[in-house]
Image (spheres, rainbow, N blue to C red):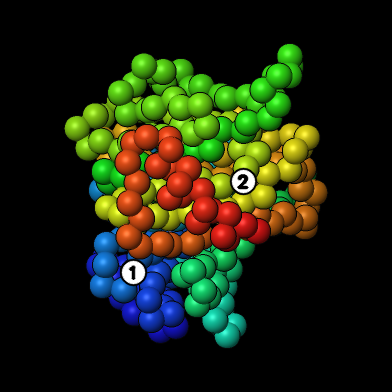
Amino acid sequence: MEETTYKEFKKCYRLTNGVADLVVTASVGPRIIRYGFVDGQNLFGEVPDVSVEVGKDQWRIYGGHRLWHSPEANPRTYAPDNSPVTTEVRGNTLHLIQATEPMTGIRKEMEVTLFEENNHVRVIHRLTNQGLWPVKLSVWALSVMNVEGTAVVPQPQGDRESLLPNWRMTIWPYTNLADPRVAWGSKFITLKQDPRNAARFKIGLSDQEGWVGYLLKDQLFIKRFRHEEGAEYPDWGCSLEVFTNDRILEVESLSPLTTLDPGGEVEHTEDWYLFDQVKVTAEESSIEQNVVPLVRSVSR
């Protein structure tokens, strides 16, 4: 681990195991702005010029991986995070603490650890209620992925002979189910990022498998997380959401909704893995043969 600069970010930390590296911003955010193989492509997308007006201030997406709290609303969700964060180095773990959001009373923290095996990264996300009244929220972990890749979302399978439904999907008002970027398979949903298509597309689902993948130029990013069956999730039961437009594709995991009393905290953990030379075609059989075994090899 070393302190460094990265493009516009004056204070960052670079973590590497010699094979993969990631860069975490400390001058803003925090954001994990880069994750990839050393000297290779960044699997995360960088978006320096997109912002959202929040009162007299601006929230900037920056790109990479960030921590929000759901349900989404402006200004609550878009509390600006353009200031430096407090950092603590503990062995091979970087602990980042954001100042409490004045408008929500919520303090955000990330603990980031890079391991050697499978280029494994563990990110612990923590929200603490520093306010004076209870707040109902979900930990929302969002990763902006680089352009022209494909997200792979597993469909819960269940008993094919059952007469009752076994999972649900949430659709946003702007989502076109006939969008050419999405493919509705029998075992997987795939969503392509297309820089030529500016239309917004978003779906969410109860991801009982607890994973999502992103394929970019023969490299595979796997995000694993815990899905709690029977728990109350935001957005009509979503533990996973995927969004795309012409600039980005986001893969987003969520924790169950929790009511935090003053002083209360909640955590949500993601485990990331990075694989090279993963040859996958558009057929579901190719995903089954080349992606699923890698997911199973890193099962939590």
- In space, the residues marked 1 and 2 are separated at their CA atoms by 24 Å
Is residue 271 rendered to the left or right of residue 237? left
x 57%, y 65%: residue = 122
Query: On the rendered image, what quadrant is the C terminus found in?
Result: bottom right
In what element is the residue under mark 2? loop
Residue drawn at the location 32% of the way across and 60% of the way down: 277
Q: Amino acid at mark 2?
A: Gly
Q: Position of residue 155 (x, y in %)?
A: 56, 33
Residue shown at the point (62%, 57%) measured from the top left: 299
Relative depth, front residue between 44 and 11? 44
Q: Residues within 10 Å of mark 1 (few under 14, many from 20)?
A: many
Quadrant containing the N terminus in the rendered view: bottom left
| Element at label 1 | strand
Horizontal and vertical percent position of residue 127: 65, 55
10 Å crowding of disc 2: few (<14), some (14-19), many (20+): many
The residue to which callout 2 is attached is 210
Residue 37: which disc?
1
Which residue is at the front of the view, 76 or 89?
89
Q: Are marks 1 and 2 in contact (CB under 8 Å)?
A: no
- Residue 82 in the image, given as x and y percentages of width and height: 41, 58
Residue 284 quadrant? top left
Which residue occupies 27% across, 62% down?
A: 41
Amino acid carrying label 1: it is: Phe
- Judge from the rendering whether residue 141 lies leftward or rightward of residue 106; answer left or right: left
Indicate the position of residue 32 as horizontal and vertical percent values.
43, 62
Q: Is residue 150 visible in the rendered structure shown here?
A: yes
